[in-house]
Image (cartoon, rainbow, N blue to C red):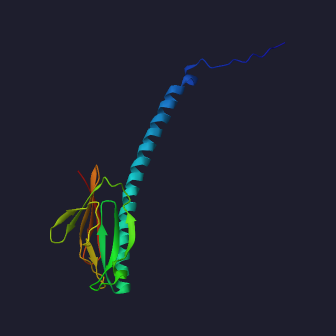
Amino acid sequence: MRILILEIGCKTKIFSRGFTLIEVLVVILIIGITTTLITLNFSSINSIEKQSNTIDKRFSYLTEESIITGRVIGWYATNSNHYAAYLSNNDSQDDDKFFAETSWADDSSVKKIFKFADGTNIELGNDKSNNPILIFYPSGENSGGILELHYSDFIQKITIKNNADIQNEITQY
């Protein structure tokens, strides 16, 4: 009579290779941290691109609105929001009505500077101005300038050319 005995475990060196639980957990932790950092970097880049796209769309909208209506439009901006109004020489109250008013996508701690084509710089404050920063003409042109948004670790420059062409540039400190 033969009795079969099962041997549990292998004592040869060929079968003793493998990873311990600690080694596997360390690798998973490193992969998780790396994935988190990559995701955060992409989301901040997407946030910057979305904001610049909204400004691009706003200026394109104002250019089209001026062409379609045949009226001159002024773009005003403060540190907290930006808006537009029809400009005219007569005293009609309908012309002074603001439209397309929008808050900036970022918080108001970002320093905003507008550089006019003649070299004059103004820092956007919290008070509404009586003078527009940009003027859009029915011919499709505008007064042009550079809008600089100073964030904590980079500067975003939005160049508005007279022919309604807009360029975005991000520079590091």
Q: Position of residue 20 (x, y in %)?
A: 53, 25
Q: Residue furthest top?
A: 1
Quarter of the image that includes the N terminus: top right
Q: Give the left or right position of residue 117, taking residue 26 as reference.
A: left
Q: Quadrant of residue 80?
A: bottom left
Q: Position of residue 24 (x, y in %)?
A: 51, 31
Viewer-closest of 165 and 85 = 85
Viewer-closest of 1 and 107 = 107
Q: Residue furthest left?
A: 119
The residue under the point 37% across, 85% down is: 69
Q: Is residue 71 above or below residue 39?
A: below
Q: Quadrant of residue 34?
A: top left
Looking at the rendered structure, the number of numbered marks drawn on it comes to 0
Q: Position of residue 50 (x, y in %)?
A: 40, 61
Q: Residue furthest right?
A: 1
Q: Give the left or right position of residue 115, taking residue 98 as reference.
A: left
Q: Is residue 33 above or below residue 92?
A: above
Q: Is residue 6 above or below residue 80?
A: above
The residue under the point 35% across, 81% down is: 93
Q: Position of residue 30 (x, y in %)?
A: 45, 36
Viewer-closest of 39 and 57 = 57
Q: Is residue 2 above or below residue 87?
A: above
Q: Quadrant of residue 169?
A: bottom left
The residue under the point 44% across, 39% down is: 33
Q: Give the left or right position of residue 121, taking residue 57 as reference.
A: left
The residue under the point 31% across, 52% down is: 109
